[in-house]
């Protein structure tokens, strides 16, 4: 791997870069579509390739439970199993495990939990999570960490980050010792909840491991936007300048712009695909709900500024009809548009940084996007 910063915005901490991974070079800042179960919902791999997307995210927790290690090993790894020729980042599944609060138990060795599929008992350790992602053949892998939500006290937050740090030390040792011919990269995860001093303590614990990249965890979990921006800015400033910074689980345009401004390089979120399946699409004027009555006789495109296949060929009225009729094609067309929207959005961000006008771009984008969202909420 190599990560090379190309341009820096003169007025902010935003930067563009090139991240060379095992299956190609990724331009940053980038957004990763989420393919939780080894496939981006309602999207063919070919469609993603045609958009120029060469990095997607899958979830090790879900793949561990189904189809399981035996199937993926027999297939020759996750890339071959899902017929994806480009880069894969796999999340450890820590968030999914810790969302199963009544069904899991954390100790120093790892976490025991019951499957959400069939109730069977399982145990994950920092080492086993690395081993499984090595089996997957992930280009970037994430370690097991202790996720926390807003509202916990400082003592609990500190205990979680200390456990995360000790687990990362074990994960890093396992990853370093692996002799896979083309093993992926292990990123560290910065934790500390919403306490700035704990974020700094987390950085002190994980940065000496000198990992290829670092992620910011535990944000965008229900906190106010101003709190998000404050802790995000403090967190990003703690991470090395010469390594990629990944903000986990963030995918709304306003949050992405705030993070890019703080120097973040990588993003992922299920939001674009999830809302598409629920008849919502992203536009320059904000989020559009296709089920609204006002779209019944609207034969214009989803977004007049968009040149995706959906916008070129189909109208708001037609998409509304498909959703009302519960046609599968509705989700396919809406998802295609939302992924295309995110790709163009990130491309414009990179160009604005390269031109030294990111702050201007952000202001203009949010003015139009926010105005449309306000109008939609009152219609």
Image: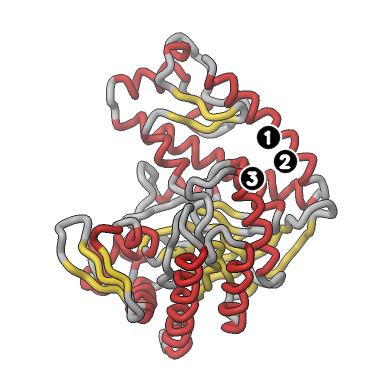
Task: Say which of marks 3 and 2 sits in front.
Answer: 3
Disc 2 crowd rating (10 Å Cα; few below 14, some 14-19, many 20+) is some
In the rendered image, which residue does mark 3 sit on? 226
Q: Position of residue 23 (x, y in %)?
A: 50, 68
Q: Distance between the residues labelled 1 and 3?
A: 15 Å
Find residue 344 and report its image quarter: top right
Q: Which residue is drawn at 29% across and 57% down?
A: 100
Disc 3 crowd rating (10 Å Cα; few below 14, some 14-19, many 20+) is few
Q: For numbered disc 1, what is the local secondary structure? A: helix
- The number of discs equals 3
In the rendered image, which residue does mark 2 sit on? 362
Q: Position of residue 260 (x, y in %)?
A: 67, 52
Find residue 290 and report its image quarter: top left
Q: For numbered disc 3, what is the local secondary structure? A: helix
Q: Which residue is drawn at 57% across and 45% down?
A: 343
In the rendered image, which residue does mark 1 sit on? 366
CB atoms of marks 2 and 1 within 8 Å: yes
Looking at the image, tell me whether mark 3 or mark 2 is earlier in sequence order.
3
Q: Is residue 312 above or below residue 173?
A: above
Asked whether the viewer can see residue 127, the reply is yes
**Front residue (pair 27, 63):** 63
Q: Residue at x 46, y 23 (%)?
A: 314
């Amino acid at each position: 791997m190599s990560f090379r910063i190309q341009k820096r915005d003169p007025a902010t901490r935003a930067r563009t870069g090139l991240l060379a991974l095992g299956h190609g070079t990724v331009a940053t800042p980038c957004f990763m579509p989420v393919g939780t179960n080894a496939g981006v919902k309602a999207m063919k791999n070919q469609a993603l390739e045609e958009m120029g997307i060469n990095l997607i995210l899958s979830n090790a927790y879900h793949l561990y439970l189904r189809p399981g290690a035996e199937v993926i090993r027999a297939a020759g790894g996750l890339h071959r199993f899902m017929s994806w020729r480009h880069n894969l980042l796999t999340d450890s599944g820590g968030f999914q495990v810790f969302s199963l609060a009544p069904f899991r138990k954390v100790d120093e060795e790892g976490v025991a939990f019951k499957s959400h599929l069939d109730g069977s008992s399982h145990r994950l350790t920092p080492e086993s999570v690395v081993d499984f992602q090595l089996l997957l053949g992930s280009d970037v892998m994430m370690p097991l960490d202790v996720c926390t939500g807003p509202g916990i006290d400082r003592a609990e937050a500190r205990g979680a980050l200390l456990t995360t740090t000790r687990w990362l030390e074990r994960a890093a040792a396992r990853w370093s010792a692996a002799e896979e011919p083309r093993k992926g990269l292990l990123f560290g995860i910065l934790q500390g909840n919403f306490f700035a001093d704990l974020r700094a303590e987390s950085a002190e614990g994980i940065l000496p491991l000198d990992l290829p990249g670092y992620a910011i965890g535990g944000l965008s979990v229900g906190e106010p936007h101003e709190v998000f921006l404050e802790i995000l800015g403090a967190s990003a400033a703690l991470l090395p300048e010469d390594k990629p910074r990944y903000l986990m689980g963030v995918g709304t345009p306003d949050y992405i712009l705030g993070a890019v401004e703080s120097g973040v390089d990588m993003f992922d979120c299920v939001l674009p695909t999830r809302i598409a399946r629920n008849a919502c699409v992203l536009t320059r004027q904000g989020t559009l709900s296709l089920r609204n009555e006002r779209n019944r006789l609207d034969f214009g495109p989803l977004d007049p500024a968009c040149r995706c296949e959906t916008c070129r060929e189909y109208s708001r009225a037609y998409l509304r009809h498909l959703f009302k009729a519960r046609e599968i094609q509705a989700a396919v067309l809406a998802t295609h548009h939302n992924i295309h929207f995110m790709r163009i959005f990130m491309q414009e961000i990179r160009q604005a940084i390269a031109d030294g006008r990111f702050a201007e771009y952000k202001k203009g984008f949010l003015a139009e996007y926010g105005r449309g969202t306000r109008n939609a909420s009152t219609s």
